[in-house]
Amino acid sequence: MKFLQRDKLFSWLPNLNRQVWILGAGRLLSGIGSGFTLFYAPIFFTEEVGLTKTAVGIALGSASISGVLGRFLSGSLADSPAWGRRRTLLLSALVCAVGCFALATADNLSSLLIGNLLLWFGGGLYWPATEALIADLTNNENRQEAYALNRLADSVGLQLGVVLGGLLISLTSNYRGLFIIDGVSYLVFFGVIWVAIKESSRKNFDESTKPSMLEGWGLALRDRGLLIFALVNVLFTMYICQIQTSMPLYFKDFVSDGTAKGFSTEIITGLFTWHLFLTILFQLPVARFLGRFSHTNSLIFSAFLWGGGFLLIGLTGTLNNLPLLWAILGLAVLAMATVSYTPFASSLVVDLAPESLRGVYLSVNSLCWAIGYFIGPPLGGFMLDLPRPLADGLWLGLALSVGVAVVILKYLGWFLKRR
């Protein structure tokens, strides 16, 4: 493999294949556009178009169905010698661009639904294919850092998109322009893939012995190691979901500093900016530090961080003394938990997968995210609708569930050594 030659100034950066860096740069660009769309779409379609919050919620939530379909299809297409990773990524960028342009012209519920279904379908196509491509371009020594780089580019892009989107709205009040810019960013990403990314999957698989689409999925779903990991992976993705959905509501409605109930919107925004900043800052260093350990031990480390972080968040609502301090500490620990989870989960799945079925196995990994995000919001909402102290028990329950994750990971480590 050809790796970037780094001078002393950039010697701290991961030594990765040039295409991994190009893919990360493209993802950063498209992530900025996604930050425009994901954050401001609900505001635009309720306040400007005039749809009800319920209708917008249904339209945005239903898109997870097309996301699941995209993930399922992506793995099979990425593994196909006749199609491959590169064409799947090109298709993903094109579908996302069409979805953005559809949202830019949407003026009713039906057109919103169509645009959002296309956007999420394209997003579903993206992740398994790009993670399979990264697996092909890396080795066991640098794979975790490559996955960390891809997640870092996504996080930075989303944050920049939210900030720049807010700036553009304040200057122009033109929400539809954000969707157009998002669509253009995906077209640019399409061009980057077309010019700079080469097909990485092996083209010499024996077509007579290579499993068909359904056979490949059958093999993956009969892989005991993959299924064991899927159980704990759903837990981890549900944890991430709670940060994004339940935690803002908890800070708003259940926290009290003795004088006022709930943190202000400005404080909540600052807290989550702090969390994202730490996630970006420590993504690569943590991946490099934990790379010396096995994947299962790294994930066990992540699990303990999740438990500690949730206990600290629970203190913000149950202790009246210094709730802001507990929130700052809790989100800092949860940032470390996040960055110690995402690269090692994908790397573990790559190790489990036969080379000819990397795309399918990584689709299973991606589908765990869809399941976690399907379970997480209703669970958090149900708990926060309960009276106190039961509502506060959400964070204690999540912390205790870490014990289940650790037991599963311990068993998985033992199982993999035997296999």
Image (spheres, helix red, strand yellow):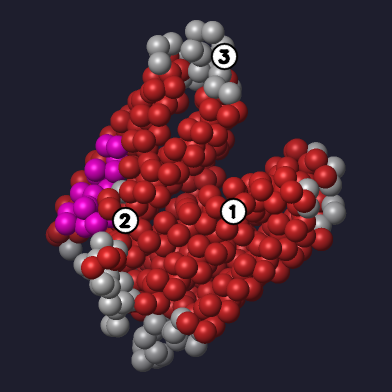
Real-space Cα distance between discs 1 and 2? 21 Å
Q: Is residue 183 left or right of residue 31?
A: right
Secondary structure at numbered mark 2: helix
Q: Which residue is mark 2?
A: 284
User: Which residue is nearer to you in this view: 171 or 359?
Assistant: 171
Q: Quadrant of residue 138?
A: bottom left
Name the front one of labels 3 and 1.
1
Task: Please name the residue shown 71% across and 59% down the image.
Answer: 179
Q: Which badge, 1 or 2, is on the more N-terminal residue?
A: 1
Circle 1 SS class: helix
Q: Where does residue 203 sit, x and y in percent of width and height?
A: 39, 89
Q: Position of residue 2 (x, y in %)?
A: 30, 83
Q: Can you say whether 200 is above or below 63 in the image?
A: below
- Span of residues in magenta: 287-305
Q: How many marks?
A: 3
* Residue furthest front as drawn: 9
Predominant secondary structure, magenta span: helix
Amino acid at dot 2: Leu
> Looking at the image, is mark 3 or mark 1 earlier in the sequence?
1
Where in the figure is residue 255, as x and y percent of width and height? Answer: 50, 18
Could you tell me how far apart the alpha carbons at marks 3 and 1 are, in whole angstroms?
A: 31 Å
Contact flag, marks 3 and 1 (Cβ < 8 Å)? no
Residue found at x 33% / y 42%:
336
- The residue lying at 41 percent from left, 62 percent from top is 150
Residue hosting label 1: 161
- Identified at 56% across, 12% down, the residue is 260
On screen, residue 215 above or below 180: below
Q: Disc number at residue 261?
A: 3
User: Does 392 sit above or below residue 399?
Assistant: above
Query: Height in image: 251 above or below 341?
Result: above
Q: Amino acid at mark 1?
A: Gly
